Image: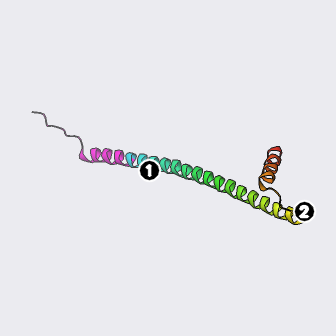
Amino acid sequence: MPALRWPRPKKEAAGIIDAANKRAAALVDEAKAAAVVEADRIKAAASAEIEQERARAQEELMAKVSQLAIQGAEKILGAEVDASKHAAMLASLTVES
């Protein structure tokens, strides 16, 4: 009767270890890719937030400049300048720029 030959345990173990190492490397690569995607998402959100804050600050600054211009004109003219007309004039100048 011929002797049964079983696969060599060391060879089989080496194959299992090699497959596990390949899977671990793939998991690391997937995690790196996910981290890059998340970092890009965070950067985009931060850029959008910065742009919104910049626009808000610019609007606030324009309002303050308008108010100062009205106050200065009132002092020069010695009479009250209509704020709504002044705002409309500034808006038309902004559109023209």
Spot occupied by residue 78 in the image (x, y as percentages of width and height) = 88, 65
- Looking at marks 2 and 1 on the same chain, the residue that comes earlier in the sequence is marked by 1
SS of the residue under disc 1: helix
Looking at this view, is 69 or 27 the one in front? 69
Residue at (80, 56) in percent of width and height: 82
Q: Which residue lies furthest to the left in this view?
A: 1
C-alpha span from label 2 to label 1: 72 Å
SS of the residue under disc 2: helix
Q: What stretch is highlighted in magenta?
A: 2-21
Q: Which residue lies furthest to the front in this view?
A: 79
Mark 2 crowd level (few <14, some 14–19, many ≥20, 10 Å Cα): few
Q: In this view, does 4 lie above or below 61?
A: above
Q: What amino acid is found at the position of numbered circle 2 in the picture?
A: Leu
Q: Depth-wise, is mark 2 or mark 1 nearer the camera?
A: 2
The quarter holding residue 74 reads bottom right
Spot occupied by residue 42 in the image (x, y as percentages of width and height) = 55, 52
| Residue 83 forms part of the magenta stretch | no
Spot occupied by residue 34 in the image (x, y as percentages of width and height) = 48, 48
Main secondary structure along the magenta-highlighted residues: helix
Left or right of 86 on screen, residue 7: left
Spot occupied by residue 61 in the image (x, y as percentages of width and height) = 74, 60
Mark 1 crowd level (few <14, some 14–19, many ≥20, 10 Å Cα): few
Residue that carries the numbered disc 1 in the rendered image: 28
| Residue 11 forms part of the magenta stretch | yes
